Image: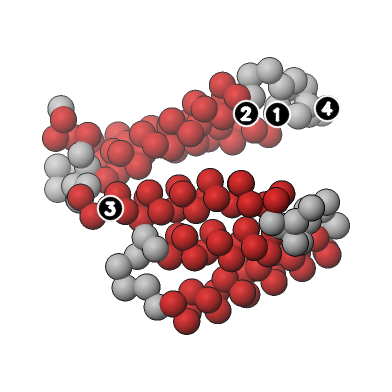
Amino acid sequence: MSNILLRQNVLGGLLLVLFGVLGLALGASLDIGTVRRMGPGFFPRILSWLLVGIGAGIALAGARDASADRVSAGAWRPLAMVTIALLCFQLLIDRRGLVVATIAVVGIAALGGRDTRWPEVAALAGVLAAGAALLFVKALDLPIPLWGR
């Protein structure tokens, strides 16, 4: 049994199921409404159930495939750095603004790779920060601070 849980598709599918269940739990207090008059909880609940279903399908397919790839010890570093990057984005977006938060998330996530080319990371961070600023602040007129409050 523990051998099955170390397969990449099984763990990935179970992670999707976990996110779907978390979405269902966090959105349980939101009104669903009807199909004609959707409430604020309608779309999140649909997406959460889709995550649960797709994740279960991926996990079952991975459990059936005896030749599936196993999780390697090196796969934890990228996962940890992307998670840290997302947490830093959440902490920085209000205090330092969208531009700084976007550059930070790209830089921290890049630390998860073994062969990171920093000039390319810097270019990507700049392009993503400019694109996010143009899309979310200018085009969609969302109340997100560009440089902090």
Q: Nearer the viewer, mark 4 or mark 1?
A: 1
Q: Examine the image and state in which quarter residue 63 appears.
A: top left
Depth check: give the residue in front, 12 or 143. 143
Of labels 1 and 3, earlier in sequence is 1
**Amino acid type at mark 4:** Arg
Disc 2 target residue: 45
Residue at far bottom of view: 119
Q: Is residue 64 left or right of residue 27?
A: left
Residue displayed at 41% across by 54% down = 81
The CA distance from mark 1 to mark 3 is 35 Å
Could you tell me the amino acid type at mark 3?
Ala
Residue drawn at point x = 55 percent, y = 79 percent? 123
Residue topped by disc 1: 42
Q: Give the quadrant of the N terminus.
A: top left
Mark 1 residue element: helix
- Residue topped by disc 3: 75
